Structures are given as C-alpha cells and as structure tokens.
Amino acid sequence: MGIFITFEGPEGSGKSTQVRLLVSWLRTRGVNVLATREPGGTEIGDRIRSLLLSPTTRALTVEAEVLLFSASRAQLVQEVIRPHLEQGGVVVCDRYADSTLAYQGYGRGVDLEVLQTITRFATRGLVPDITFLLDIPVAEGLARKRGNQAEWNRMEQEVVAYHERVRAGYLALAAADPHRWHVLDAREDVATLHARIRHIVAEKLGWSGDEVDPGHSP
Ligand code: TYD
C-alpha cells in the first residue's frame, strides 16, 4: 500500500496552494503521486459536486447532503484512490471524510457516530495516513476568502458561529488522533508551510534530511 495524505481546513486556509506545492515537489522527486479533491474527482463525483455546490440547489436536507458527499467519496475511493494506493503510489486529497465530520457533524449538528458509520461504509474503512489541518481563526479565513477585511464584519453572526463550530470540530478531531493529524498555522507564509509539510511527508516516506531539502523550494 502507498501513502494517503489529506488536507483539511476552512475555505481561505490556502489548502489548494499547499496541495499543489506538495504534489509538484513529490513529482520532481519521482514519486508516483495522484492529486484529487472532494467532492468530485470522478465523473459521477463531479456530477454530485455540481448538485451539492450549485446555488440553484435549495432545500437539500442535511441527511441528503451527508449522503451525497458520502456517495461522491465512495466513488472516489473505489475508482481512484484505492487502486492508486494498491500500486504503491501516493494520493493527495483536498478534503476527505473529516470534512463531513467537521461541517455536517460539528457544524450542523449531525450525530458523529452516525457519520462515522456512514463514512466507514462509504470508504470501506479507508483512513488517511497523514492529515494536515490548515488552521486559521474564523474571521481571518472569511476575510481571505472574500478578499476584503471589512466585509466579514457585515456577515450574520450565525454564519460566523457555524464556522467557529467547524474550526473547533477540526481541532477536536486533530486532538483525538495526533498521530495522524498535523495542525499547521495557515497564517504562516506559503513557503514556510510548504517546508513543514515536506518534512512531515518525507519522514513518512522514510527519507533522510538530505533528500528533503536539496534546492526544490517553491
Ligand atoms: P470547494 O469549492 O471545494 O471549497 P474548498 O476550496 O474550501 O475545498 O467546496 C467544498 C465545500 O463543501 C466546502 O465549503 C466544504 C464543504 N464540504 C462539506 O460540507 N462536507 C464534506 O464532506 C466535504 C467534502 C466538503
């Protein structure tokens, strides 16, 4: 089996930038790496994604939302992730099951045990080897996402409280399994974060210090 790496965090945490940097660094080192994201990453998953994220999707129940995210995940695991891991490759995924626990569980109040059961079923028990949490205070994440510091102040308190629950949920998940999770401060600059991520991944791959640094800075 290869190595399964996931990235978690709120919108505006710089996840996709770090995924991109990690993937291209691994590629330059000759690693067979596959990059993917959730929801989506397969033909069926992309159709589910557009249903889930489209502003025209109204009145979706939280149960239906959980099952759609999980359906997209089931397809991605069976069709893409597992086959690549079985070939000994590395998979880097932008969001995975922990997003469901954080957003639908902690954020929207769905029973966590129910979500764990659905997730085990959807993924056939596939758990990441390494999960990076790009943590950022809610106000800063929202401001980054909106590209405007003044803007978030006008947001409804309810929206902010929801994101606070998601963040606290992520931190609780990370605290419960520190062996898998690595919490990073997303306010650090891009290169510093990338270097931290590189060291953790290199250690997992069993590479020595020399193999981590030689001039492949972004
Ligand atoms: P996306 O546009 O991919 O945003 P990001 O760049 O932040 O990943 O949107 C994914 C959205 O779906 C994001 O708001 C998180 C949410 N989400 C859930 O609520 N539950 C889940 O299980 C997953 C995978 C995502």
Image (tube, rainbow, N blue to C red):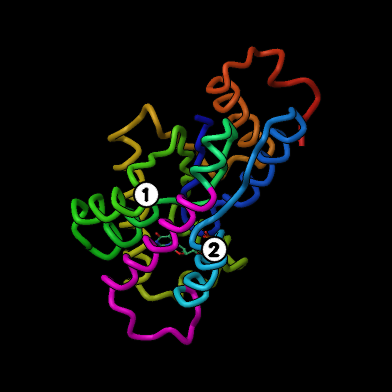
User: Residue 19: x, y in percent?
Assistant: 62, 45
| Residue at 68% across, 31% down | 31
Secondary structure state at the residue bearing disc 2 = helix
| Residue at 65% across, 49% down | 17
User: Residue 40: x, y in percent?
Assistant: 53, 62
Secondary structure state at the residue bearing disc 1 = helix
Is 208 displayed left or right of 63 in the figure?
A: right
User: Residue 28: x, y in percent?
Assistant: 77, 32
Disc number for residue 123: 1
| Residue at 25% across, 50% down | 116
Q: Quadrant of residue 143?
A: bottom right
Is 209 displayed left or right of 29 in the figure?
A: left
Q: How many marks?
A: 2
Residue type (three-letter) at the residue carrying disc 1 = Thr
Q: Quadrant of residue 201?
A: top right
Q: Mark 2 vs mark 1: which is more N-terminal?
A: 1
Viewer-side residue, 164 vs 154: 164
**Looking at the picture, does residue 186 appear above or below residue 203?**
below
Mark in front: 2 vs 1: 1
**Mark 2 surroundings: few (<14), some (14-19) or many (≥20) residues within 10 A:** some
Residue type (three-letter) at the residue carrying disc 2 = Ala
- Prevailing secondary structure of the magenta residues: helix
> Badge 2 is on which residue?
143
Q: Split into 4 quadrants, where in the image is the C terminus?
A: top right
User: Residue 49: x, y in percent?
Assistant: 50, 70
Viewer-side residue, 72 vs 211: 72
- The magenta span reads 53-80
